[in-house]
Amino acid sequence: MATKAKQGPGKAQKKGRSSSGRTTAAGKAAAGSVQSNRYTPPIPKNAKTSPKWMGILIIALFLLGVLVVILNYAGLLPGGVNNLWLIAAIGAIFAGLLLATRYH
């Protein structure tokens, strides 16, 4: 019967991995992937920056929506408790969320 050599903790070889822990050799592309030699310039800094008012508007829309919900349930808005106020609040929060996805 052949005896196996003892391996200490953390020294076990996993299937498909080399001893360095890499799945592919350093600097080589994985099989099936395509490396491009075309240079892509970085996006200019000024193209990524949103105006300051956009961040303020996002926060204002979120706070407006929350405030309308609270005031509606407290019955402090004109017309008393009304579902139209809740729809307007959800619309304000949704508009703030849409702006937030475009903020850089």
Image (spheres, rainbow, N blue to C red):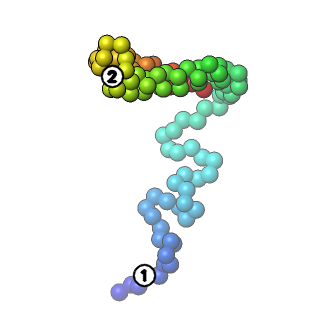
- The kind of residue on which mark 1 rests is Lys
Q: Is residue 78 above or below residue 41?
A: above
Q: CA distance from mark 1 to mark 2?
A: 78 Å
**Residue at x 58%, y 62% (from the top left corner):** 20
Residue named by callout 1: 4
Q: Which residue sits at x=68%, y=28%?
A: 42
Nearest the eye: 17 or 59: 59
Question: Label 2 amino acid?
Answer: Gly
Disc with the residue nearer the chain's start (1 vs 2): 1
Provide the residue designation for mark 2. 75
The label on residue 23 is none
Of the 4 image quadrants, the one containing the N terminus is bottom left
Tell me the SS state at disc 1.
loop
Residue 46: name its quadrant.
Answer: top right
Q: Secondary structure at mark 2?
A: loop
Which tag is nearer the camera, tag 1 or tag 2? 2
| Residue 41 visible in this rendered orientation of the protein | no
Q: Position of residue 48 (x, y in %)?
A: 65, 24
Is residue 28 shown left or right of residue 31? right
Is residue 79 visible to us here? yes
Q: Are marks 1 and 2 in contact (CB under 8 Å)?
A: no
**What residue lies at 34% left-to-right and 26% top-to-bottom?**
74
Tell me residue 51's x, y (percent): 65, 19
Q: Residues within 10 Å of mark 2 (few under 14, many from 20)?
A: few
Label 1 packing within 10 angstroms: few (<14), some (14-19), many (20+): few
Left or right: 103, with 70 as reference point:
right
* Residue at the image point whose x is 65% and y is 21% from the top: 52
